[in-house]
Image (cartoon, grey):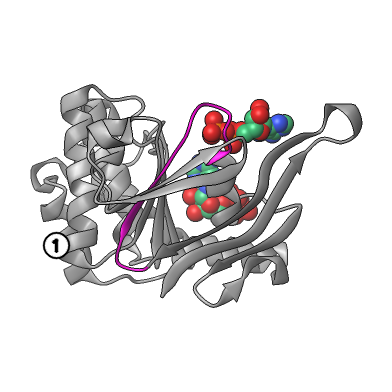
Amino acid sequence: RDAARVTDAVKVYGSGDTAVRALDGVSVGFPAGRFTAIMGPSGSGKSTLMHCAAGLDTLTSGTARIGGTELGSLDDRRLTLLRRDRIGFVFQAFNLVPTLTVAENITLPMDLAGIKGSRDWIDALVDVVGLRDRLHHRPAELSGGQQQRVAVARAFAGQPEVVFADEPTGNLDSRSGEEVLNLLGRAVRQMDRTVVMVTHDPVAAAHADEVVFLADGRLVDRMESPTADRVL
Ligand code: ADP
Ligand code: ADP
């Protein structure tokens, strides 16, 4: 079963002579319960694929689904609700709210939505990301790696069907990056979550169960159980 899937995805930015075909007929599924990495050179369409798969942007043609829901069939309001209730996001620039504590940042999306969330789940999550003794700190009091761990906890807090991570280690040193990647791997393997991660880093991609490779807006390869030297 695919947690997310795009079929015959085409994305054209602009029009006429300056049009850019960022996705040129991509069909790919992201299986539930797996950690999939999207790799490829700069400009190959990785971010565009993630944004369209996650309902942050719309395809020019083709379809994008989250579970059984086709995103093109939703109006803006329903699409916003779908992103809020069924998807988690981790971005390169942590995007925490500086005035809120760690605990408040983690539950913010649910608090805004008026959703209660499972106490036991959040409790387990706080332990997995190793933030128990930082819950009442503010983001500025944390290292970059700790801030990204908060962002990871926030992404999983509402038990979304899939978490999309766009270059989650891009702003981190290699040790903190490794911790965040281990965390994503543990969420998938121990907590039965689904993660789709965009990265250009082979070391990061080697943490995934599977890597799909883009080049010039097309899917050119897939690899199971990647290792950094095979991905390169
Ligand atoms: P990647 O994430 O692999 O670096 P992107 O998906 O960001 O690739 O970009 C794919 C192509 O689409 C590139 O040629 C990029 O310049 C172009 N592109 C991306 N976003 C936009 C945009 N908002 N407007 C115009 N062109 C864009
Ligand atoms: P709204 O229409 O309610 O303002 P948004 O488009 O801002 O909704 O985003 C809805 C969901 O998508 C949120 O859960 C948000 O976390 C996520 N999201 C969208 N774009 C970004 C972004 N650039 N950075 C972080 N999260 C984003």
Q: From this view, report whether residue 174 is shown above or below residue 5.
A: above
Q: Is residue 15 magenta?
A: no
Question: Which residue is located at x 31 percent, y 32 percent?
Answer: 202
Q: Is residue 113 visible?
A: no
- The residue singled out by tag 1 in the image is 124
- Local packing at callout 1 (Cα closer than 10 Å; few below 14, some 14-19, many 20+) is few
Position of residue 221 in the picture relative to residue 127 (left or right):
right
Question: Which residue is located at x 28 percent, y 26 percent?
Answer: 140
Position of residue 195 in the picture relative to residue 82 (left or right):
left
Badge 1 element: helix
| Direction top: furthest residue | 173
Position of residue 40 in the picture relative to residue 197 (left or right):
right
Q: Is mark 1 within 8 Å of ligand 2?
A: no
Instruction: Read off the magenta span.
Output: 32-46
**What's the magenta bit mostly, secondary-structure-wise?**
loop
Question: Where is residue 196 drawn, in percent x and y?
Answer: 39, 52
Which one is in front, 172 or 23? 23
Q: Is residue 33 magenta?
A: yes
Quarter that holds the N terminus: bottom left
Q: From this view, report whether residue 173 is shown above or below residue 50.
A: above
Q: From this view, report whether residue 107 is shown above or below residue 105.
A: below
Q: Is residue 203 visible?
A: yes
* Amino acid type shown at disc 1: Ala
Task: Name the quadrant where ligand 1 sits.
Answer: top right
Question: Where is residue 66 drawn, in percent x and y?
Answer: 52, 68
Question: Which residue is located at x 40 percent, y 68 percent?
Answer: 161
